[in-house]
């Protein structure tokens, strides 16, 4: 009983983590399934068919590539714009700061249906053709806010003495930025970009409003849900999940090692 | 990942160092222009456009509307959909409370007890974002299936009014809770992480029971995280229509469904726009009242 009381919080915490991963495990397990009928919902028989023939169903890989293209463009543009805003907010005093903050906050406080439908209202009123670029435009819009918030946190957490030290050592502003500020902020920017990409890649609601006849990966899944999601979709999603997780965890481990090395170097 | 971390703490840490502050603001404006222009053109202008659309009148041709000042669109929208609004806010409200209760122990554990595992655990909290939202939601159809283990278990206890979970409001609320849980955990963690663990010891030294210590010390100090987390969960949950569509019965449809079908299927743009605007107005009101009462004004 005492043991339970002492370890109650870790146990609950662990259970919550398990809860977070149960549906993902279901998605992964069902990628090895040979469904009985159209709907890949319950376990029937082990099979590697989907993995061996991952593009075997028409439209799956096409929509997957479309989502990656949109994700890459939107992430690149959104990360650059967002990082610039973050620098301006943390490093400069200027008029209109609170308006800027509000403009960054509001898209995050707006439900996706409203973001999606309002952009559609604009595109309809302008008679702008819906498709690849309207979706990309929408994704850049919602990525910016998340990048600003992430990079801003990193900039604020930075020790200002590092830049002062660079200036004391006669580094001009460009050199200070190039050799001190930017490398220190880079992990934050990369984290923001990763977040932006996963938001874009996974977005259904805003995309659905502005896609017209374009089919992104989530739009494909949504359409397929009515008539049975092909097993290949589970395989692709599992693949993306594993690659992303391995990448992030290894970046973390490398970062931790570098930090330890630097700390021991400073300590000695 | 620190993505949502700052939402909890506010801008107390803004450092505008002496040299930087002296720099002329012109550079600042140059840095701001592209991003702010983008947000203005593709966020602010669309909202204005949405507002005008919500006042448009039919032309007689399906899907084509003309500029007007048809305020009655709002009355029609409210009259027809107010039960949907009420239902949406009940579902998302319950989901938010559930998420808070579930997320708090994990955030607490990561902040105070995780030690060197902290960074890894934070990665695991955001990891679900790397797996498709739609597929994860759809996976609940397997987990909560009528013949499945969970449904049978609760049925054996006679706890389910409809003898099933799937295609009932319970499934919708569970789906909402699950999907937005990371948005609750991260700000909670960010707020808890700032608390000096010695405060807990001090409370203990002053003969506070663990519960009193939590109630009087930890909970008040974690409030910024609670505010940020509940908002980041409540807002997307109240506008969501994926969970209601994939997990609920047609009678469990939420406002998001109403907006989506009016926009994309009925092509009744004015009513759909009015619905969006009402939803947005209610949410903003809730946000401001809530922030005011909780006493934290800087969420970004």
Image: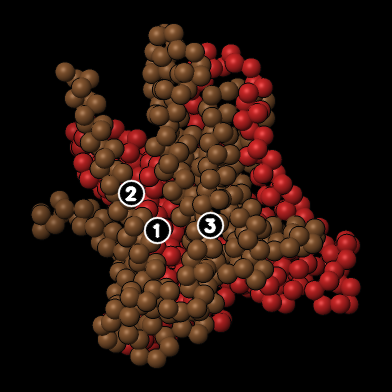
Is residue A142 positioned above or below A160 on the image? below
Can the viewer see residue A97 in this picture? no
Q: CA distance from mark 3 to mark 2?
A: 21 Å
Read off the chain for label 3: A
Instruction: Determine whether label 1 and label 3 are within 8 Å by CB.
Output: no
Residue B224 x, y percent position in the rendering:
44, 41
- Any mark on residue A33, and which? none
| Number of on-image labels | 3
Question: Which residue is painted at 66% across and 28% down in the image?
Answer: B29
The residue shown at (37%, 82%) is A41
Q: Which numbered dot is residue A69?
A: 3
Quadrant of the rendered image containing residue A162: top left
Task: Identify the image quadrant of the N terminus of chain A.
Answer: bottom left
Q: Are marks 1 and 2 in contact (CB under 8 Å)?
A: yes
Callout 1 secondary element: helix
The image quadrant that residue A243 belongs to is: bottom left
Residue tagged 2 = A248
- Of the chain colours in the picture, the one used for chain A is brown
Identify the hue of chain B: red
Say whether residue B30 is left or right of residue B92.
right
How crowded is the residue under tag 3: few (<14 C-alpha within 10 Å), some, or many (20+)? some
Q: Do pointers 3 and 2 mark residues of a single chain? A: yes
| Mark 1 on the same chain as mark 2 | no
Q: Position of residue A122 (x, y in %)?
A: 75, 57
Q: Position of residue B230 (x, y in %)?
A: 47, 52
Name the front one of labels 3 and 2.
3
Residue B196 shows in the view: yes
Q: Residue at x 70, y 44 (%)?
A: B40
Q: Which residue is mark 1?
A: B130
């Amino acid at each position: 009983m005492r043991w339970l009381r002492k370890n109650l919080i870790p146990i609950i915490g662990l259970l919550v983590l398990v809860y977070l991963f149960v549906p993902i495990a279901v998605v992964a397990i069902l990628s090895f399934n040979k469904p009985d009928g159209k709907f890949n919902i319950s376990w029937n028989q082990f099979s590697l068919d989907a993995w061996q023939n991952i593009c075997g169903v028409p439209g799956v890989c096409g929509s997957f590539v479309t989502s990656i293209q949109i994700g890459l463009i939107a992430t690149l543009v959104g990360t650059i714009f967002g990082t610039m805003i973050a620098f301006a907010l943390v490093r400069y005093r200027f008029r209109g700061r609170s308006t800027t903050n509000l403009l960054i906050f509001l898209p995050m406080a707006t439900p996706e249906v409203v973001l999606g439908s309002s952009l559609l209202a604009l595109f309809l009123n302008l008679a702008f053709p819906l498709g690849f670029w309207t979706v990309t435009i929408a994704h850049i819009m919602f990525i910016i806010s998340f990048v600003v918030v992430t990079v801003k946190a990193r900039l604020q957490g930075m020790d200002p003495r590092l830049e002062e030290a660079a200036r004391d050592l006669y580094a001009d502003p460009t050199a200070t930025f190039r050799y001190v500020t930017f490398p220190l902020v880079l992990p934050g920017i990369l984290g923001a970009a990763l977040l932006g990409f996963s938001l874009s890649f996974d977005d259904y609601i805003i995309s659905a409003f502005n896609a017209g006849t374009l089919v992104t990966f989530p739009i494909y899944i949504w359409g397929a849900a009515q008539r049975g999601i092909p097993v290949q979709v589970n395989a692709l999603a599992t693949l993306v999940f594993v690659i992303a997780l391995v990448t992030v965890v290894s970046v973390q481990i490398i970062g931790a090692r570098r930090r330890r090395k630097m700390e021991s170097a400073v300590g000695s | 990942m620190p993505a949502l971390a700052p939402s909890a703490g506010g801008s107390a840490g803004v450092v505008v160092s002496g040299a930087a502050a002296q720099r002329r603001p012109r550079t600042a404006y140059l840095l701001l222009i592209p991003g702010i222009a983008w947000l203005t053109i593709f966020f602010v202008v669309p909202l204005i456009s949405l507002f005008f659309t919500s006042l448009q009148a039919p032309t007689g041709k399906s899907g084509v509307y003309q500029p007007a000042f048809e305020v009655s669109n709002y009355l029609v929208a409210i009259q027809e959909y107010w039960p949907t609004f009420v239902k949406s806010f009940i579902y998302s409200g319950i989901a938010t409370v559930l998420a808070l209760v579930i997320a708090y122990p994990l955030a607490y554990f990561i902040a105070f007890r995780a030690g060197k595992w902290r960074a890894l655990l934070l990665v695991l909290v955001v990891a679900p974002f790397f797996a498709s939202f739609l597929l994860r939601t759809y996976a609940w159809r397997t987990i909560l299936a009528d013949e499945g283990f969970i449904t049978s278990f609760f049925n054996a206890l006679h706890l389910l009014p409809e003898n099933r979970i799937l295609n009932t409001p319970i499934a919708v609320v569970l789906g909402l809770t699950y999907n937005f849980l990371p948005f609750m955990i991260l700000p909670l963690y960010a707020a808890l992480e700032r608390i000096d663990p010695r405060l807990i010891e001090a409370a203990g030294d002053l003969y506070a029971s663990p519960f009193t210590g939590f109630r009087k010390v930890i909970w008040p100090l974690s409030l910024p995280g609670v505010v940020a987390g509940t908002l980041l969960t409540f807002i997307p949950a109240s506008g969501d229509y994926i969970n209601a569509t994939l997990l609920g019965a047609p009678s469990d449809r939420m406002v998001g469904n109403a907006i989506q079908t009016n926009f994309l299927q009925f092509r009744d743009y004015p009513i759909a726009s009015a619905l969006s605007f009402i939803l947005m107005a209610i949410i903003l009101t809730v946000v401001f009242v809530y922030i005011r009462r909780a006493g934290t004004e800087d969420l970004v």
